[in-house]
Amino acid sequence: MKFSIFIIIAFCLLSCKKKVDERFTKTWYDTEYRIPGKSTLKIKSDFTFRYNARGCDWHTISKGKWKVIGDTIELNSISIDTCYNVFPFAECLKFGENNNRKIQTTIPNCNAESGKVYTIFNKEKFYLKNDSLVYRQRANSNCTESLKIVFAKTEKIKKNGY
């Protein structure tokens, strides 16, 4: 009798495990053709993600957790113990608005290396459209509608031999 109850409880606990939405789990590549620059967003099946972007003299990373809400994936960064300057994933500022702004860091009062940035994803939402992952701008965003952040399943083709 005790063995039967144990099996029933074990079965219930195993069946309650979250199921991964495999539509999102893969490495996504930016679709911006500005050269040089490259970014990737890796959505893992363990409900974590990693973001990497790089240009000539800058590099940004992020890592965190994700969840699916309806047809949308929501990304949230986690804290890290390495010193980086911190900037939000998508923030549009008016000209000159950033001049007097204190740059935040991942560790209070640390001196981050120039060009090293930790990107904060704070309830950032993306949805699937065909074979792309499209960023959903917030209603209160200062960004224009012309700003489109889109990731694709395949890496972009570099132009002009770069």
Image (tube, rainbow, N blue to C red):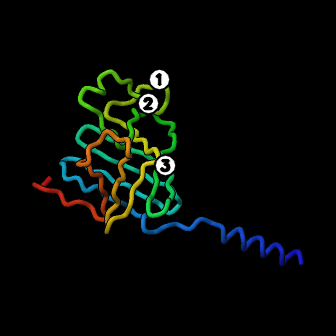
- Mark 2 vs 3: CB contact within 8 A: no
The N terminus: image quadrant: bottom right
Left or right: 116 in relation to 75? left
Q: How far apart are marks 3 and 1 (CA)?
A: 23 Å
Q: Is residue 116 left or right of residue 3?
A: left
Q: Residues within 10 Å of mark 2 (few under 14, many from 20)?
A: some
Q: Which amino acid does label 3 sit on?
A: Gly
Side of 66 where 41 appears, left or right: left
The Cα atoms of the two marked residues, 2 and 1, are separated by: 7 Å
SS at mark 1? loop
Spatial CA distance of label 2 from label 3 is 17 Å
Quarter occupied by residue 143: top left
Please report whichever mark, 2 or 3, sits nearer to the chain's N-terminal start.
Answer: 3
Above or below — where is 4 with respect to 112? below
Residue 56 quadrant: top left
Q: Residue furthest right?
A: 1
Amino acid beneath label 2 = Thr
| Pointer 2 with pointer 1, Cβ within 8 A | yes
Q: Where is residue 135 in the image (x, y as percent from the top left)?
A: 35, 53
Q: Earlier in the sequence, mark 3 or mark 1?
A: 3
Residue 148: x and y in percent read 27, 51
Task: Relative to 1, say whether 69 is above or below.
Answer: above
Q: Which residue is drawn at 42% across and 68% down?
A: 23
The amino acid pointed to by label 1 is: Asn
Q: Position of residue 81 (x, y in %)?
A: 51, 36
Q: Which residue matches tag 2?
A: 105
Label 3 sits on residue:
64
Residue under the point 35% across and 24% down: 101
Q: What element carries label 3?
A: strand
Q: Which residue occupies the extreme top position in the image? A: 100
Residue carrying label 1: 109
